[in-house]
Amino acid sequence: MPYKRLVVEVVSQEGNCAAGHKVGDKIIFEDDEIKGKICITALYSIMPKIFAMKFEAKFPWLEDKDIAPHACPDGNNPVIFKITREELE
């Protein structure tokens, strides 16, 4: 099983994100590193999905098995992320 690189991109942001996330921001999960800025609340909420996707999890409700949305838990200032699973050679 090749390791998967996971790219997390901000695709939507409303209100006033306290961490300053903006549309287009990218966070890369690769090897043992997280490259990019992500607030601790978003990180805490997204890690179970990151871990699952890294190890080939399949979510039957997704149209594309390698792309999953994720919402920040701040309902007053929502940030929507797109997680993309990429193959490494």
Image: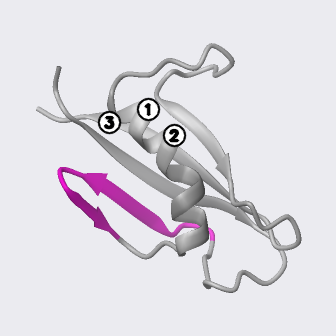
**Which badge, 3 or 2, comes first in the chain's sequence?**
2
Residue at image x 34%, y 34%? 54
Estimate the x, y position of residue 36 in percent, counting from the top left: 37, 72
Q: Nearer the viewer, residue 12 or 3?
A: 3
Which amino acid lies under the numbered mark 3 shown in the image of this protein?
Glu
Main SS type for the magenta part? Answer: strand
**Which badge, 3 or 1, comes first in the chain's sequence?**
1
Asked whether residue 78 is drawn in magenta, I would say no
* Segment tinted magenta in the rendering: 23-35
- Residue wearing tag 2: 49
- Residue wearing tag 3: 86
- Work out which quarter of the rendered image holds the C terminus and state it: top left
- Report the residue that reaches farthest toward the right: 76
Residue at image x 42%, y 32%? 53
* Disc 1 to disc 2: CB gap under 8 Å: yes
Which amino acid lies under the numbered mark 2 shown in the image of this protein?
Lys
Q: Nearer the viewer, mark 3 or mark 2?
A: 2
Q: Nearer the viewer, mark 3 or mark 1?
A: 1
Asked whether residue 31 is drawn in magenta, I would say yes
Tag 2's secondary structure?
helix
Disc 3 to disc 2, C-alpha distance: 15 Å
Looking at the image, residue 81 lies above or below residue 63: below
Disc 1 to disc 2, C-alpha distance: 5 Å
* Disc 3 to disc 1: CB gap under 8 Å: no
- Report the residue that reaches farthest toward the left: 89
Q: Nearer the viewer, residue 24 or 43?
A: 43
- Report the residue that reaches farthest toward the top: 60
